[in-house]
């Protein structure tokens, strides 16, 4: 199945100059979603204890992936959304900073966590999610996205963590 055909390019969203990769056509197809989750599950990252995913489109792939792998799920969210005690990591954007949070008990010491998002652009969000897992005492088993904007070289912000994508856009 050509998963890339289930992406819709939306120019100038959410602001001028951004070519937004809209995944709603993929969400609309049960076959495409099954294929995407199956392909994410097929990457061999070794033993996985938990899947973590990044608000909000990452959840759409992370929860079914966790269920397929037979492990629990932990959400990574923007500040102020999680109700319990959190760890926070700030990261640098082109202009300014952003932050993500995780529940302090969302990852237990020694757990191997697979991090998932719909898309990696600059890698800032995924890199911060890796730091959150490590702040909880967990280990990043690997990182995976449905779409990778390769020309932004987001992998450089993931250190030595392994990264895989289903659709790499040059
Ligand atoms: P980054 O931290 O730069 O890697 O940005 C990744 C996050 O921003 C992901 O959660 C994506 O959902 C979102 N994102 C960034 N750029 C795009 C884009 N061109 N199309 C769709 N989503 C994007």
Image: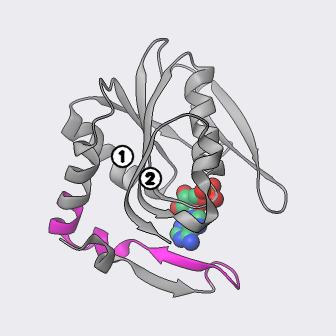
- The residue at the point 63 percent across, 31 percent down is 131
| Front residue of this view, candidates 139 and 71 | 139
Colour scheme shown: one colour
What element does badge 2 sit on? helix
| Front residue of this view, candidates 50 and 164 | 164
Residue 31 visible in the shown view: yes
Query: Is-magenta flag for residue 33?
Result: yes
| Front residue of this view, candidates 42 and 83 | 42
| Front residue of this view, candidates 76 and 127 | 127
Q: Relative to 158, is 29 above or below? A: below
The number of callouts visible is: 2
- The residue at the point 76 percent across, 56 percent down is 93
Q: Relative to 7, is 103 above or below? A: above
Query: Is-magenta flag for residue 114?
Result: no
Residue 58: mark: 2
Q: Is mark 2 within 8 Å of ligand 1?
A: yes
Quarter of the rendering occupied by the N terminus? bottom left
Q: Position of residue 105 (x, y in %)?
A: 51, 19
Q: Position of residue 83 (x, y in %)?
A: 58, 33
Mark 2 burial class by Cα count in 10 Å: few <14, some 14-19, many 20+: many
Provide the residue designation for mark 1: 62
Q: Relative to 13, is 51 above or below? A: above
Residue 83 visible in the shown view: no
Residue lying at the far right of the rendered structure: 96
Q: Relative to 91, is 108 above or below? A: above
- The residue at the point 21 percent across, 72 percent down is 29
Residue at mark 1 to residue at mark 2: CA–CA distance:
6 Å
Q: What stretch is highlighted in magenta?
A: 13-34
Q: Where is residue 154 in the image (x, y as percent from the top left)?
A: 60, 54
Q: Are marks 1 and 2 in contact (CB under 8 Å)?
A: yes
């Amino acid at each position: 199945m050509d998963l890339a055909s289930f992406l819709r390019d939306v120019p100038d969203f959410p602001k001028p100059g951004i070519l937004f990769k809209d995944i709603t056509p993929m969400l609309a197809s049960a076959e495409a979603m099954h294929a995407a989750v199956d392909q994410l599950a097929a990457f061999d990252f070794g033993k996985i204890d938990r899947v973590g995913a990044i608000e909000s489109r990452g959840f759409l792939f992370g929860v079914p992936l966790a269920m397929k792998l037979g492990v629990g799920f932990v959400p990574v969210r923007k500040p102020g959304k999680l109700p319990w005690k959190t760890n926070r990591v700030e990261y640098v954007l082109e202009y300014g900073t952003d932050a993500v949070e995780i529940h302090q008990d969302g990852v237990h010491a020694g757990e191997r966590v697979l991090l998932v998002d719909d898309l990696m652009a600059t890698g800032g969000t995924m890199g911060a999610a890796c730091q959150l897992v490590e702040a909880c005492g967990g280990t990043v088993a690997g990182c995976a996205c449905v779409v990778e904007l390769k020309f932004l070289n987001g992998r450089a912000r993931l250190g030595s963590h392994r990264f895989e994508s289903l659709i790499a856009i040059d």
